[in-house]
Amino acid sequence: MILSLDTFSEYLGISLIDGHNILVRQTYRKLKPFSELLLDRVDSIFKHLGYDPSVLFAVCVNKGPGSYTALRVGITAAKTISYSLNIPIYAYTSLEAMAYKYRHYQGVIKTVVNAGKGECYTSDFISSDFSIKQTSEIKLVKIKDFEKSISDDCIAVVSGINMTGKNIFPLTEDLSVEGTLMALKKGLKEDSFLLEPVYIRSA
């Protein structure tokens, strides 16, 4: 089975997945720093289920973009588990996982994550036959400019930004399940020595 950690947003997500069976999915709103919650909650899950961590064959983590400090907490925890159990680590970007969550939609999907300072991280995808293809690089743009880019022939999946509209879909949970299923399907294995959070802002 695989342990999945997601710390990119205000939602802390921890999932335990066995094949296509979701054994555990826990989502917590950010009430305190994730560093004070993450490993304690993981340990509690294994104790509650009566499992030893040795049952894991891999660990998966969200590498962003998102809250850089929170992402480092998740990635560091994933690396620690990977090292200690000698298991591979998979990683996915938040923007692609957000699009993958809506893979049933046929057409253009824009995903966007609040970057602070009135800016956002965004990327475009095309969804066809439950397959997601990225059609633009991850960009850092003004939120007001992103809002202008939304047309009637697309949907926008939004994290951390107050936007409304018939084709706007706010993200209200973590991405630990969707991101992991996508990462496994696409074989997004990472070098645990080189894995770092996605960082777009240059200054």
Image (spheres, rainbow, N blue to C red):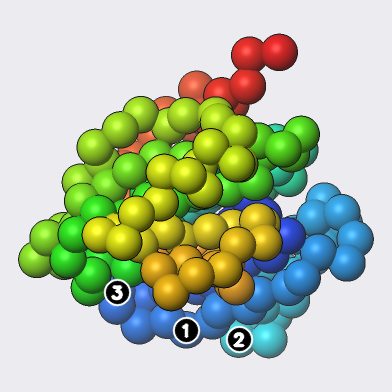
Which of the image's four quarters has the C terminus? top right
20, above or below 81, in the image: below
Which badge, 2 or 3, is on the more N-terminal residue? 3
Q: Would you name the residue on which mark 2 appears?
A: 49
| Three-letter amino acid code at the position of disc 3 | Gly
Q: State the residue position of label 1.
A: 23
Residue type pointed to by label 1: Leu
Which residue is drawn at the image coordinates 43% and 74% (left, top)?
166
Q: Give the x, y percent position of residue 120.
A: 60, 39
Task: Tell me, for residue 19, which label it has, or none.
Answer: 3
The one nearer the camera, 142 or 195, is: 142
Query: Could you tell me if residue 71 is visible in this image?
Result: no
What type is the residue that disc 2 sits on?
Leu
Q: Residues within 10 Å of mark 3 (few under 14, many from 20)?
A: few
Labels 2 and 1 touching (C-beta < 8 A): yes
Residue 169 percent location from the top left of the image: 48, 69
Q: Could you tell which of marks 2 and 1 lies nearer the N-terminus? A: 1
Q: Secondary structure at mark 3?
A: loop
Quarter of the picture holding the N terminus: bottom left
Instruction: Name the residue at 59% across, 58% down.
Output: 159
Q: Residues within 10 Å of mark 2 (few under 14, many from 20)?
A: few
